[in-house]
Image: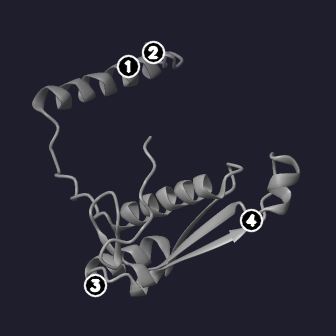
Amino acid sequence: MAAALIEPVDGAYHTPRGRRIAAESVSWIATRSGGPGGQHANTSDTAVTVSIEVATTGLPDVVRARVEAAAGPVVSASSARSRSQWRNRQLAWQEALARLDEAAAPPPPPRARTRPSRGAREARLRDKRAVGERKASRQRPGHDD
């Protein structure tokens, strides 16, 4: 997986699906991380959290409303998997963009209603009849039998 460019181009970032996000809506926070890495990781600000404020992204109103409904007013992601802040920035950025793109995707079209075929209806009725006959055969014989 190639490292993604995290620099704004013409004052905006671009998601993998080509959506344009205003640079002002993105904020980065680096904090101390736990986990592996020994003294270096525990004293360096290597964990990274990226937050994208949806209201100021510059997305079209329909897309912005869809993102806010699915992901809330702020889309954020964090990473502390690596000892490198640069790598954690890459991972958090990719995750945030994936969440934003997923939330911005239009809903799938409604399923087209279909009717069962004649053969399927006949098979269902045949199976129902067989189950009924099986259950009837389990009953005690009546007085007239």
Determine the residue positioned at 85% across, 58% down. Answer: 42
Instruction: Provide residue 22's location: percent of width, then percent of height.
Output: 36, 80
| Residue under pointer 3 | 61
| Residue under pointer 4 | 45
Marks 3,2: beta carbons within 8 A: no
Near-viewer residue (144 or 40): 40
Distance in Å between CA atoms under marks 4 and 1:
73 Å
Question: Dot 4: what SS?
Answer: loop
Identify the amino acid type marked 1. Glu
Marks 2,1: beta carbons within 8 A: yes
| Residue under pointer 1 | 133
The label nearer to you, 4 versus 2, is 4
The label nearer to you, 3 versus 2, is 3
Identify the amino acid type marked 3. Asp
Distance in Å between CA atoms under marks 4 and 2:
76 Å
Identify the amino acid type marked 2. Ser
Distance in Å between CA atoms under marks 1 and 3:
61 Å
Q: Earlier in the sequence, mark 4 or mark 1?
A: 4
Distance in Å between CA atoms under marks 3 and 2:
65 Å
Instruction: Provide residue 25's location: percent of width, then percent of height.
Output: 45, 82
